[in-house]
Image (cartoon, grey):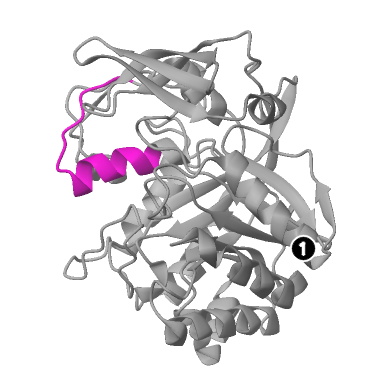
Amino acid sequence: MFIQTVSLIRQFPFISNNMQDTKTTSLCHICYRHCEAERITKSDGVHLIKHCPEHGSSDYLVEPDINFYNNLVYDKAGYSIPQGIMIEVTDKCNLNCPHCYHKPDNKTVDKPIEQILWQIENRFNADAGAVILAGAEPTVRKDLPELIKQIKQLLKKLGRPEDVCILTNGVKLSDRKWVKEIAEAGTNMVMIGMNHHSYQGMKVHEKQLKGIDNCIAEGIFVYYVGYTLEHVDHMEEVLEEIQALGNRAWQYRIRAGSDIGRAPDEPQFFLSRHVAKIKEICDRKGWTWEKKPADDNLYHYMVNINGITHRIIQWSDPKTIDLEQLQCGPWCDFVPGKPVTNFLHQIMLRDAVVNEGKVLHDTVPPKYLFQPENIDYEITEWTWKSWDDSKKKQSTIV
């Protein structure tokens, strides 16, 4: 359904990820430089051993269930990824989720529409796919409908697919009149990131649920609804809500097991334990369980539960990130033409720069770039802001 609704699927060569290929690339969790790493199987599971020239070697358990890990690691000649342009259109937000990588700044001035249009026209390839408007929270922009209209006009002029998606927390979508306005402006699709209601309370959660119905009523495709768990005991309640929502969304995502959204009583909630917990609930309730082969990798697991697609996700963190394992959808680069390997890596770097005040000095290994043959980077001193504004280069692009 998603492929038919928005033309986002494209084939790319795949780098072999079997267990014989133990060499990989990771990040030093102290300085965030890329560093050599290797995957090693030990008696207690699969480990990632990293070697930073400045901070030495470190050893982290990635997955205790070796068989589970080996079934996730896969090797094939090609794969499909959702391909789109993700642009952050504001730093403002109407929530303040504790697990979010984007620290909101409600005093900032939004970047002008002209700059966003320039980015779309000049920074991205002609076949880059849908324009995904992100933020902090894009729906807090007062001129969002006008921005969408102008993006649609630009895409039409450029002969590109006229697909505009909003990545949102869904709160503003509870306003049916406003949803109708963005639909008429040209919004094709939304991706809604919700949480368990323990984060912001039932009042916010009910607005998000109402927003899903409003989008459907106004003809906006709900690509996914995502849940971040604050506590593992909330899993059953979330699964029951997904069953109640049914096919309102094409896919539902459940996220836990990292520094973002980690269950507080678990030092690390590994993906195998996440899946086992959900499977136990399904068996107890008599729900059908059909494993889906698509998108298998270290960080997520696809399954149909009672015919509803679930993506069970364990976000990596700076200690365990394995860039070879991120050479597949949905983690691949949403922002072609920038010095970033993939979306998850992008999140970590933002977290380091914005929330920890780090200045990064690094060069991305060319094999991890979206189109390495067309890009040559020399990054001398870089901050997150320099990514978003090519006209104010704090990095050197040669």
Would you place residue 7 above or below residue 172 in this image?
above
- How many badges with numbers are in the image? 1
Residue 57 picture location, percent across and down: 30, 13
Residue bearing the label numbered 1: 284
Would you place residue 393 above or below residue 200 in this image?
above
Q: Nearer the viewer, residue 212 or 397?
A: 212
- The quarter of the picture where residue 364 lies is top left
Q: Secondary structure at mark 1?
A: helix
Q: Residue at x 85, y 59 (%)?
A: 288
Q: Is residue 29 left or right of residue 179?
A: left
Residue 52 shows in this picture: yes
- Residue farthest to the bottom? 177
Q: Quadrant of the C terminus?
A: top left
Q: Nearer the viewer, residue 188 or 269?
A: 269
> Would you say residue 247 sits in the magenta stretch?
no
Q: Residue at x 20, y 16 (%)?
A: 55
Q: Residue at x 65, y 47 (%)?
A: 275
Residue 351 picture location, percent across and down: 28, 45
- The quarter of the picture where residue 155 lies is bottom right
Q: Nearer the viewer, residue 96 or 148?
A: 96
Disc 1 crowd rating (10 Å Cα; few below 14, some 14-19, many 20+) is few
Q: Is residue 301 left or right of residue 231?
A: right
- The quarter of the picture where residue 395 lies is top left
Residue 234 picture location, percent across and down: 53, 67
Q: Residue at x 70, y 60 (%)?
A: 281
Residue 159 shows in this picture: no
Q: Quadrant of the N terminus?
A: bottom right
Residue 35 picture location, percent across and down: 34, 15
Q: Nearer the viewer, residue 141 or 269?
A: 269
Please provide the residue range marked out in magenta. Answer: 346-363
- Amino acid at the residue labelled 1: Arg
> Would you say residue 360 sits in the magenta stretch?
yes
